[in-house]
Image: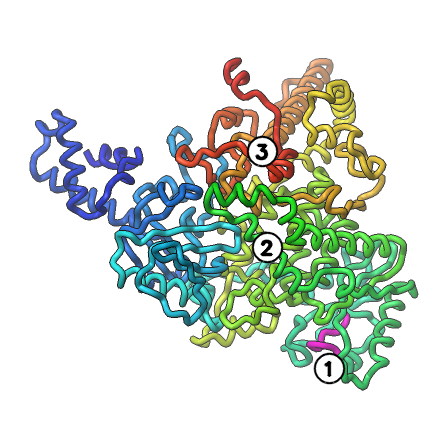
């Protein structure tokens, strides 16, 4: 009987309940009994009471949030309505809304919509294969550090944006929570008592932006999580890691790691260890430091195989009386680079400012975060002009252009110094992009993580201020600089789809991870603030936080496979020349019926840089040659910005469908290669009269395999995959035909699924 009750819940009938109390369960249990005469005849009153007790306990446990170590419930409200996106406040589900010291959590009896199941039965109708689920947060959870703005909506549609310290009105009709990941949550308080509604809104407002870093949930999480030291967490905080990087790049003779800033005696803005020219002594560094903004001396970032080096430097203080220090530093850099020329690139002239990025991101957010169909189609009518007006792609293009120019200088044996006021924002962007263009190692997952750790985390990009994690951050200090960088990397990935080992899902997940607020990687403004947080917290206890690169803390092994790029696997596989030649010839002959996106990847069509962007052509070198003109080759990052936008979703299509087909193609090629190798081996062994040998099939490391073709008939595979699909049976979208569709047209996969299913 108890098993049948749980099955009854799993069929989603519980979400239709208007009351969530024990009395409701009694009526449901009675309904089950009435429909099962055999159970009534064989089971007595004692067992009925036991069933009622188990059912009530099951439900009460189901309606509670999952809590992390150190997480505590602060406030909650019952009978809250969460509205489905683009439903005009007419569809949704009822449940309990909780505020903890980590997140805003909506819990409903429909457990399949939010519960992470690490070990699942594939026959379970609510099991979604390969749909990314986070172990730390559920689908209906919003980390407090991810909240961008809170809007209170009153009767009549009047809205009020709540600021820290604002007076919260008790007459809240709806509450809109706008998130930094472009998601929008709308809650209704029609059935919630006014005092309870006011308390929970106040709790969300108060805890979403604390006024001190040690009041962030990360402190309690680190204190109670009992995390241990690991290499990823400490990468480049130790001298040995810098030494290893200099050795890898074979430049440890003229550049050295200095500990002049040990215990941050010289500068609070630099790490304890960094790289400088060998020809500068520590005493000289100490004298020079106080002449630069933030005591940020010129520091090393990269050295090419030809000896040309890339450095980052802040500007001299206006009243500096040591004008010769920059000249001395320049001479030292030249000498460390083999007396090559040095060009100083002023990023304030070539790249957008933090203020430009903030203004641009606000406009982009307003364009992508619509809540109703009418609002969406109104935006869509002027989509191109509004996107152009946001200047977002223009800013991305400026960064790519500057990075390409820097890479060209380095390849031409000219050292480059990136000059910025504090050398913590656009210098991070341009430096990393230039290294990605030049060095294929940084296009792997490991290399990319080390690059971000070194250039962003350790060298002091102010994540806390730029992502507005702390109350009181000045407007001028806010701006998603890291998002601009990830978008620029995504643009490179689109232009060179087989030259990166990671997928766009890896980049999107990285942006989401930056706003969880519990990882050491994206939480601090500098190495000094990180040290102070760990050693001088309010409880004076040493704590430890995990690294964002420890993906096993968030995802299962299958989920992590989604980060792998099938085209990179295909590009790096052997014995493909003949297969690719035949495929390209076939596609050329059928170009009229081939999709545009496949045509420009697999043929010479749309080859703007003399075949440099050809997908399968053997590259002349490992250096990329990006195109940075926005009208020509820059696109909107739909997976990141439009994944929650229901009308913009492509059912069973979009880039995720391309990704799935690419995975299946790679699996098939590897399978055929394995069969050929096995047959050849059997033939040789028969000639030698030797017994058979079992050859293990090579693993592609991809999430979709040859057994995954059944997913073609699954409605969850939309252009938002692998993130929670916004398209449901209640929110089926209409196909759009407007300016936005021009940007999404490249994502379409022309495939007749109905015929495929009919043949099966």
The residue that disc 2 covers is 363
Vertical placement of residue 447 versus 579, above or below: below
**Left or right: 48 in relation to 308:** left
Judge the density around disc 1: few (<14), some (14-19), many (≥20) Cα neighbours within 10 Å.
Answer: some
Q: Is residue 310 left or right of residue 266?
A: right
Please tell me whether residue 59 belongs to the stretch shown in magenta. Answer: no
Residue 172, label in figure:
none
Rendered view: 315 above or below 725: below
Q: Is residue 291 magenta?
A: yes
Residue 322 against residue 175 in the figure, above or below = below
Question: Which residue is nearer to you in this view: 45 or 407?
Answer: 407
Q: Position of residue 198 (x, y in %)?
A: 31, 63
Question: Is residue 417 in view?
Answer: yes
Tell me which corner region of the image, top left, top right, bottom left or bottom right, holds residue 280.
Answer: bottom right
Q: Of 669 and 203, which appears nearest the observer?
A: 203
Q: Which residue is mark 3?
A: 737
- Label 2 sits on a secondary structure element that is helix
The disc, 2 or 1, on the residue closer to the chain's N-terminal end is 1
Dots 2 and 1: beta carbons under 8 Å? no
Q: Tell me what residue is drawn at x 80 percent, y 61 percent.
A: 310
Residue 223 position, x and y percent, is 44, 66
Label 3, secondary structure: give it. loop
Identify the magenta region. 290-298
- SS type, badge 1: loop
Tell me the CA gap for discs 2 and 1: 39 Å
Q: What whole-number distance in Å separates the C-alpha atoms at marks 1 and 3?
A: 59 Å
Q: Name the residue beneath numbered marker 1.
A: 290
Q: In the image, 58: left or right of 117?
A: left
**10 Å neighbourhood of mark 3: few (<14), some, or many (≥20)?**
few
* Alpha carbon distance from label 2 to label 3: 23 Å
Q: Quadrant of the N terminus?
A: top left
């Amino acid at each position: 009987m108890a098993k049948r009750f749980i099955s009854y819940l799993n069929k989603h009938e519980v979400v239709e309940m208007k009351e969530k109390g024990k009395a409701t369960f009694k009526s449901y249990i009675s309904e089950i009994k009435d429909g099962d005469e055999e159970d009534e005849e064989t089971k007595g009153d004692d067992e009925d009471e036991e069933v009622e007790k188990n059912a009530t306990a099951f439900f009460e446990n189901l309606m509670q949030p999952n809590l992390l170590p150190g997480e505590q419930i602060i406030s909650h409200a019952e009978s809250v309505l969460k509205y489905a996106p683009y439903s005009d406040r007419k569809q949704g589900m009822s449940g309990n809304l909780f505020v903890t010291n980590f997140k805003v959590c909506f819990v409903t009896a429909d457990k399949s919509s939010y519960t992470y199941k690490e070990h699942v039965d594939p026959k379970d109708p609510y099991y979604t294969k390969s749909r990314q689920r986070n172990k730390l947060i559920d689908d209906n959870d919003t980390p407090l550090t991810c909240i961008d703005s809170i809007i209170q909506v009153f009767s009549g549609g009047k809205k009020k944006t709540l600021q820290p310290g604002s007076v919260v009105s008790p007459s809240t009709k709806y509450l809109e929570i706008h998130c930094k990941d472009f998601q929008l949550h709308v809650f209704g308080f029609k059935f919630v008592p006014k005092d309870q509604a006011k308390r929970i809104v106040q709790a969300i407002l108060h805890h979403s932006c604390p006024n001190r870093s040690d009041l962030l949930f990360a402190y309690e999480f680190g204190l109670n999580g009992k995390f241990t030291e690991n290499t990823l967490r400490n990468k480049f905080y130790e001298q040995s890691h810098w030494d290893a990087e200099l050795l890898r790049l074979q430049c440890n003779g003229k550049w050295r790691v200095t500990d002049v800033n040990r215990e941050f005696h010289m500068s609070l803005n630099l790490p304890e260890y960094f790289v400088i020219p060998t020809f500068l002594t520590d005493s000289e560094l100490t004298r020079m430091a106080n002449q630069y903004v933030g005591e940020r001396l010129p520091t090393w970032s990269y050295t090419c195989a030809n000896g040309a080096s890339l450095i980052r430097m802040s500007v001299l203080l206006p009243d500096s009386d040591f004008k010769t220090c920059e000249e001395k530093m320049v001479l030292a850099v030249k000498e460390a680079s083999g007396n090559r020329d040095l060009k100083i690139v002023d990023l304030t002239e070539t790249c957008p400012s933090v203020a430009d990025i903030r203004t641009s991101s606000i406009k982009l957010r307003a364009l992508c975060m619509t809540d109703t169909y009418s609002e969406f189609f109104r935006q869509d009518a002027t989509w191109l002009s509004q996107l152009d007006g946001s200047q977002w792609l223009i800013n991305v293009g400026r960064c790519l252009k500057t990075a390409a120019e820097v890479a060209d200088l380095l390849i031409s044996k000219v050292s480059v110094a990136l000059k910025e006021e504090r050398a913590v924002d656009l210098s991070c962007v341009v430096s990393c992009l230039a290294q990605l263009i030049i060095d294929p190692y940084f296009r792997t997952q490991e290399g990319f993580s080390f690059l971000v750790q070194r250039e962003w985390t350790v060298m002091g990009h102010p994540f806390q201020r730029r992502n507005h994690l702390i109350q009181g951050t000045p407007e001028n200090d806010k701006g998603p600089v890291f998002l601009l960088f990830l978008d620029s990397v995504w643009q490179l990935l689109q232009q060179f789809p087989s030259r990166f080992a990671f997928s766009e899902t890896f980049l999107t997940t990285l942006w989401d991870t930056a706003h969880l607020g519990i990882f050491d990687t994206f939480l601090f403004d500098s190495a000094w603030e990180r040290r102070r947080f760990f050693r001088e917290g309010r409880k004076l206890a040493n704590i430890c936080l995990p690294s964002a690169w420890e993906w096993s803390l968030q995802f299962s092994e299958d989920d992590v496979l989604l980060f792998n790029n099938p085209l990179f696997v295909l590009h790096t596989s052997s014995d493909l020349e003949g297969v690719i030649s035949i495929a390209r010839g076939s596609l050329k002959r059928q170009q009229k019926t081939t999709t545009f996106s496949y045509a420009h990847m697999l043929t010479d069509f749309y080859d703007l840089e003399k075949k440099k962007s050809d997908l399968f052509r053997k590259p002349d070198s490992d250096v990329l040659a990006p195109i940075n003109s926005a009208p020509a080759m820059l696109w909107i990052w739909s997976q990141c910005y439009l994944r929650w936008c229901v009308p913009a979703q492509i059912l069973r299509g979009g880039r995720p469908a391309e990704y799935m087909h690419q995975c299946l193609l790679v699996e098939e090629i590897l399978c055929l290669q394995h069969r050929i190798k096995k047959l050849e081996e059997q033939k040789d062994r028969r000639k030698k009269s030797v017994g058979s040998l079992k050859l293990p099939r090579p693993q592609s490391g991809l999430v979709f395999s040859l057994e995954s073709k059944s997913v073609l008939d699954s409605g969850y595979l939309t252009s938002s995959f692998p993130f929670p699909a916004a398209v449901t049976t209640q929110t089926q979208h209409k196909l759009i035909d407007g300016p936005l569709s021009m940007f999404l047209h490249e994502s379409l996969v022309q495939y007749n699924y109905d015929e495929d299913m009919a043949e099966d």
